[in-house]
Structure formats: C-alpha cells, structure tokens
Image (cartoon, helix red, strand yellow):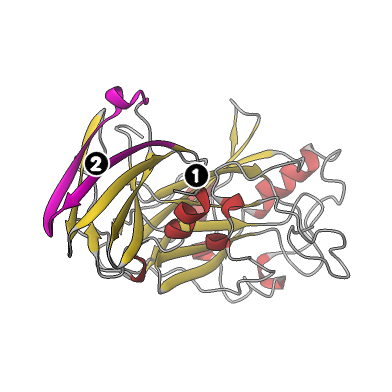
C-alpha cells in the first residue's frame, strides 16, 4: 500500500454527518477556559487564500507544520462537536493553514506574497480522535495589511461535506505576545480590531480562541470548540464513495483503548482485507491481512504488544480487495487517557 493511496483515503474520511462549534465567553476566555458548548454552528468564512487540496498531497498529513518557519511555538487544539447532540465528533479530517510571522503564505506567489509558490510550510491536517479533538504544533502567525491575525481551518465530516472558517485571538494577549518577542515579530502590534476586519466585523464570538502561555514550551496554547451540523458517530459508518459499496468500517472497541482493541467491519462480497496502522505523522507501522473472507460481519483483533507498538493514538485503514477493485477507509483509534 502506497502512502499516497492511504492519504487519499483519509481525504475521504467516512463519517456521513455534519459538524458545528460551541461559543466562547469573553470573560472566561481571559481565564483560559471555554464554557460548555451551546451547539451554535461555526460561521462559514472564505477559504482563501489558497487552502490547497490537502487530501491530494501526502506532504500535509502531519501534526507539526512548522518546517523552517521561525516564531513563537503555538500548540493548537480544536474540538469538533456535532450540533444535533452536542457530542464530540470522531474521525473528521481537520485542515489548518495560516501565514508566517511576516504575513506570508506558502503555496502561491502574488504581488504581496512573492517567492512562496511550491512551498508547504504552516499547512497540515489530522483526524479527530474519540474526544473530537485534533492537535497541531505551529508558530504564532503574524498579520498583514487589511486582516487581523487569524488561522484558517476546514473540517471534512464526510467526502461530500466540509465546513470552512477562521479563528482569531484576544487582542490584548496577542499584542503582548508581539511586544514581548519584538525581535521576531518586527512588524509590531496588530493595528486592527475585530470590527475593522472584513471577516470578523459581522461577529467573532464563536471564532475567538483561547490564548494562554505554556511554561513548558515557552510558547502558547490555543483552543477552540467548533460546532457543525450532524451528530457524533458510533457503530458502522454510512457507505461512502471510497468504499464502493463493498464494505462498512466500524469504530474500534473499546475506544479509547489500552493495548488491545477490535476493529469491526461488514463485507458486501467475498474479499481479501488488510488492516493497516499508521502513526499521526503518516508512517505505516503494521499491517494485518485476511484472505477470502465471505460476505457478512467480521472483526480483526489488534494487540499492540504483539505488534511491537506502544499504546498511542493511531489511524487505522481497512483495504478491501475483490473482483470489483480495491477500496479503503480510515478511522482513528484513541489511546486510553489521551
């Protein structure tokens, strides 16, 4: 199995639901803690500038998106919530992208963004775990003329639905960060407020992320809860285009798990199957195979100790091969206590 084929499968993460985001209270945000969700949908914003199609590019399946960019470390955590039941949504694919400390974006060049075509820094995607969460390591973004400091994100709930939005930060805390690190952020304080920004001027309450210092890294942590239409998903997933109608892949159980877990699936036709385990940096670690399985319900037992793996959060992919072709789908198995 080629890594590109796996990552294209992740790009069609089969969920069959929609996502939403919970709101934040300004006073609570100053203390660094979000309120419980009220299942208010995240506002939809423009996808620009040039988000790229990460599902078609294997470079971007990663947690650390910094590459060669300098800046203050920022640990980003997003929690995806389904509006129908206000529960975390696992197995959704989340993309992030943003400018560097000087206001430049990778991937394209234009008058105010020269020399960036073909570069890949500060872009990446992950899949949500059993808590509906993804985490990224990046740098705190700068700002550029006409826009307040922000991060773009895109949530793929299924192969046919995605939500696109942006997040921003408390102005006082953000500008203090710039001032304390003036040698890096040479443009100084962000001159705009929310009402002067053409994206957030019509409201920003549900896009205002926390921003707190991290004594361990010397950087900052940011958190946002994002609500979309739909519900958290359990059991067998709805058929998605990438499965070709040949199988349904279930969530591993128990999940979260410790060292052993079971992956259930249902076959439409007699098939060979292979279960692959990948880490969150896109490296394939193990594969378990079964041949000539009949139609119906099946399960594969996964024992990390026998595979020589540590207990961790992994992506698992099921490949089903039969007379109709090869089909794949992915989900996340979440480590106990993760």
Q: Secondary structure at mark 2?
A: loop
Residue 193 - label: none
Q: Residue at x 68, y 46 (%)?
A: 140
In the drawing, does residue 17 fall left or right of residue 167?
left
Residue 114 placement: quadrant? bottom right
For the image, the number of numbered tags is 2
Badge 1 or badge 2: first in the primary sequence: 1
Task: State the residue position of label 2.
Answer: 255
Q: Quadrant of the C terminus?
A: top left
Q: Residue at x 31, y 45 (%)?
A: 275
* Residue 151 among magenta residues: no
- Rendered location of residue 115, percent (x, y): 86, 59
* Residue 293 among magenta residues: yes
Q: Residue at x 84, y 50 (%)?
A: 188
Q: What secondary structure do most residues of the magenta stretch adopt?
A: strand
- Rendered location of residue 277, percent (x, y): 37, 40
**Residues tagged 1 and 2 counted as in contact (Cβ below 8 A):** no
In this rendered view, identify the residue nearer to me: 187 or 91.
91
In this rendered view, identify the residue nearer to me: 262 or 210.
262
Depicted 230 relative to depicted 91: above or below: below
Can residue 245 be seen? Answer: yes
First to last magenta residue range: 285-310
- Rendered location of residue 75, percent (x, y): 57, 41
Distance between the alpha carbons at the discs numbered 1 and 2: 19 Å
In the drawing, does residue 122 fall left or right of residue 55?
right
Q: Secondary structure at mark 1?
A: strand
Task: State the residue position of label 1.
Answer: 135
Q: Residues within 10 Å of mark 2 (few under 14, many from 20)?
A: some
Can residue 25 be seen? Answer: no
Residue 64 placement: quadrant? top right
Q: Residues within 10 Å of mark 1 (few under 14, many from 20)?
A: many
Q: Residue at x 67, y 54 (%)?
A: 171
């Amino acid at each position: 199995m080629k890594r590109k084929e796996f990552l294209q499968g992740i790009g069609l993460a089969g969920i069959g639901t929609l996502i939403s985001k919970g709101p934040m209270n300004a006073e609570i945000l100053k203390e660094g803690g979000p309120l419980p969700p009220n299942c208010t949908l995240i506002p939809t914003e423009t996808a620009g500038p040039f988000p790229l199609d990460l599902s078609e590019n294997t470079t971007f399946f990663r947690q650390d998106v910094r590459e060669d960019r300098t800046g203050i470390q920022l640990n980003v955590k997003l929690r995806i919530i389904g509006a129908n039941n206000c529960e975390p949504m696992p197995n959704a694919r989340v993309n992030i992208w943003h400018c560097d400390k000087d206001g430049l974006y990778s991937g394209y060049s234009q008058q105010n963004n020269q020399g960036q075509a073909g570069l890949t820094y500060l872009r990446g995607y992950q899949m949500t775990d059993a808590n509906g969460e993804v985490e990224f390591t990046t740098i705190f973004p700068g700002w550029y003329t006409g826009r307040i400091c922000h991060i773009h994100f895109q949530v793929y709930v299924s192969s046919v639905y995605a939500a696109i939005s942006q997040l921003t930060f408390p102005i006082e805390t953000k500008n203090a960060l710039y001032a304390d690190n003036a040698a890096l952020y040479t443009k100084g304080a962000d001159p705009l407020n929310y009402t002067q920004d053409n994206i957030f001027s019509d409201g920003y309450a549900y896009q205002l992320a926390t921003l707190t210092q991290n004594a361990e890294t010397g950087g900052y942590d940011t958190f946002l809860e994002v609500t979309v239409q739909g519900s958290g998903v359990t059991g067998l997933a709805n058929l998605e285009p990438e499965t070709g109608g040949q199988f349904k892949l279930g969530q591993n159980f128990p999940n979260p798990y410790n060292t052993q877990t079971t992956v259930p699936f249902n076959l439409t036709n007699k098939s060979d199957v292979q279960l692959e385990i990948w880490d969150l940096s896109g490296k394939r670690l193990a594969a378990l195979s079964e041949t000539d399985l009949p139609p119906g319900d099946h399960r594969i037992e996964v024992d990390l100790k026998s595979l020589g793996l540590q207990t961790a959060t992994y992506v698992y992919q099921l490949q089903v091969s039969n007379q109709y072709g090869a089909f794949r789908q992915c989900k996340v198995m979440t480590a106990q206590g993760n």
